[in-house]
Amino acid sequence: MEPVHKRKLYQEVLDRLIAAISTSEFPPGSQLPSERELMNMIGVGRPSIREAMLTLQQMGLIKISHGERARVINPTPEVIINQISAAMIMLLATSSRGLDELKEARLWLETSLASMATRNATAKDLEALAASVRELQEARGDQARFVAADMGFHGIIADMSGNSMVAAVTKGMLEWLSRFKRELVSVRGKERLTIEEHEKIYKAIAAGDAEAASQAMRDHITRSNKLYWQNNEVARVDSV
């Protein structure tokens, strides 16, 4: 038999507070009681309350502002993704396979998203997508603006899926990848390719051809992935 592990007191406090939040005793937007009130309600000291509150903030369930009571946050998919972004970027920077696996995941996800976006596309969606392509064209030569327009195009397609969780994950992946590819998408001669590929994806979606949109997205991301590794390999050779 395995020994029983004694839990720290703050973990018991944390469980009580999570239960209160999940049962709408403290609904999203509401303020939690003060530290002193929580100490009296739960019967524990200030250190346990503070440690539990800090953990809740790290979990993305509350927001602590100086001079105010902690406020319960609505745990949307975007909030959850934002909570793990710093750790994910660190993982990608230190893991030998991290970027490879993320790029594979993006390829699988976005090729399916292109099909979903085609089936769900409204006139308003197509207008937004067309405007995004124009923004990409106008951003040539401006690296930061070009990367933002590139991400915006893919973000619109993610939103067109109609699935908020999928859209949040996709946008998170794009943000993480952008930290490692800002220098690549605006390489001279490659901006034109990126624009042409985005136009091809847009035209397939606008034409209602889900299969063509999916294939165009696959071609675009595959080419982008190859470009990353080709440039990364050159950088390693140059540094020797």
Image (cartoon, grey):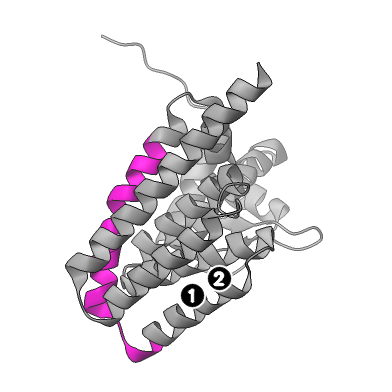
Residue bearing the label numbered 2: 136
Q: Is residue 114 magenta?
A: yes
Residue placed most toward the observer, 39 or 235:
235
Q: Which residues are magenta?
A: 101-124
Instruction: Describe the element under mark 2 as helix, strand or loop.
Output: helix
Amino acid at pointer 2: Leu
Percent of width and height locating residue 188: 61, 53
Label 2: how many residues lie within 10 Å, few (<14), some (14-19) or many (20+)?
A: many
Could you tell me which residue is drawn at 64 percent across and 39 percent down?
51
Residue placed most toward the observer, 54 or 131:
131
Q: Main secondary structure of the magenta part?
A: helix
Residue bearing the label numbered 1: 133
Callout count: 2
Label 1: how many residues lie within 10 Å, few (<14), some (14-19) or many (20+)?
A: many
Could you tell me which residue is drawn at 55 percent across and 55 percent down?
189
Residue 60 can be seen, yes or no: no
Amino acid at pointer 1: Val
Percent of width and height locating residue 72: 57, 63
Q: Is residue 70 magenta?
A: no
Left or right position of 178 against 45: left
